[in-house]
Amino acid sequence: MNKTVAVIEGDDAAPEAMRPVVALLDSLQLGLSWVRPQVGETAEAATGSTFPDAARALIDAADTTLFGSTSGKSGAALGYLRWGKETYANVRPCRYLRGCASPLARPDGIDFVIVRENLEDLYVGAEGPLEDLAPLGLVGRSVRRPIHELGSGRYAIKAITREGTERVVRFAFRLAAARTGRDGAGEPKVTCATKHNMLRDTDGLFLQVAREVAEDHPDIAFESFIVDDFACRMIREPERFDVVVMPNQYGDILSDAAGGLLGSLGLAASGCFGEDYAYFEPAHGTAPDIAGRNIINPTATILSATMMLDYLGLDEAARRIEAGLARVYDDGTALTPDQGGSSSTTEFMHALARVL
Ligand code: IPM
Ligand code: MG
């Protein structure tokens, strides 16, 4: 089987994780071939655009994209991979590996997935001066002042659609059903987290649609929490969650928090799925503070790559790499500084290659 992967290494420290991960996948001879769309600063220097048409064509022609984290100039490519490809479900697993530096006393059994709606909510990109809203005569609920009396400032639009919500919630239920086959799986459950008590129209719609979809899945448990309450529960009793679905911004924030539950953002993988395209990227940022030091934890990139292998139908290889990773953490002698170790990224990758 030959699959083509577009690889974009990302900015700052991200390439230091991405390069050895691509090399590791190559060494496993999985029939992957790589293309390298030029985006961001290098593309701008060469073509005048941070996201030239040639890069878009390579992404379109590839079976998938593996993307390192971006800051700034690769942003247009990231926007294309999300909004251009309509990758509406951002899947962010939070699974404890014995040996990682979780701040919790008893992290065993943490194995949930955040499904973040990826295109709507406060990230539709419509912000502007409050004054522009004055002619609309908008009046807040209860005793709040009308918008035109707030004075000068800025607004952001939060948009939740029925269609956008329904497809991501259906995705979450399909994922919960699929996860029942894995090792140590409990009863499938979908949890919805929204701020519907304050945002009755927007988050209220998200929750209402989630409840409707849940009725089509009597075999999968469903529950919902107000998102601030959920945040507390996620830290107090993370092992009780399975698949958690939520609007874009809460998913953005809480998936980083979930990485913290495991021990660092260096462990937080993600995959963004649409109807006919998916791409994979670590959930963390570009770690500019450690750029050039060869100490970035490549785990988030490795786990994003295993999600990609699953998507490409290479699940045996994905399980093998995950098992190898579990051994590296269990052994504990080749961990990066964020996990309390003193190994470099290269040493970590060598340890993984050895157990594989
Ligand atoms: C993430 C990141 C991105 C986001 C940034 C880089 C635009 O924080 O993938 O979670 O906000 O979605
Ligand atoms: Mg984020």
Image (tube, rainbow, N blue to C red):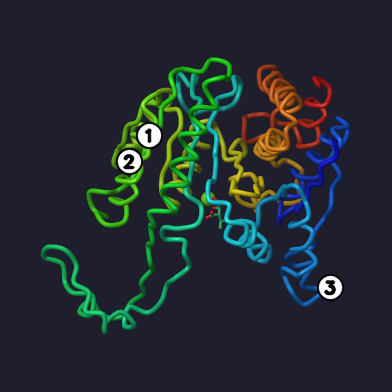
Q: Are marks 2 and 1 in contact (CB under 8 Å)?
A: yes
| Front-lying residue, 136 or 46 | 136
Q: CA distance from mark 3 to mark 2?
A: 51 Å
Counting from the top left corner in percent of width and height, residue 213 is at: 37, 39
As drawn, 208 above or below 120: above
Q: Amino acid at mark 3?
A: Ala
Q: Amino acid at mark 1?
A: Asp
Q: Amino acid at mark 2?
A: Glu
Who comes first in sequence, dot 1 or dot 3?
3
* Secondary structure at numbered mark 1: loop
Residue found 33% across the figure and 41% down from its top: 212
Q: Residues within 10 Å of mark 2 (few under 14, many from 20)?
A: few
Residue carrying label 2: 212
For residue 244, say whether it is visible.
yes
Q: CA distance from mark 2 to mark 1?
A: 7 Å
For the residues carrying marks 1 and 3, which lies nearer the camera in this image?
1
Residue carrying label 3: 46
Q: Please identify the residue farthest to the front as the structure is shown.
A: 216
Q: Is residue 92 left or right of residue 51?
A: left
Q: Please identify the residue farthest to the top as the structure is shown.
A: 184
Image mark for residue 216: 1
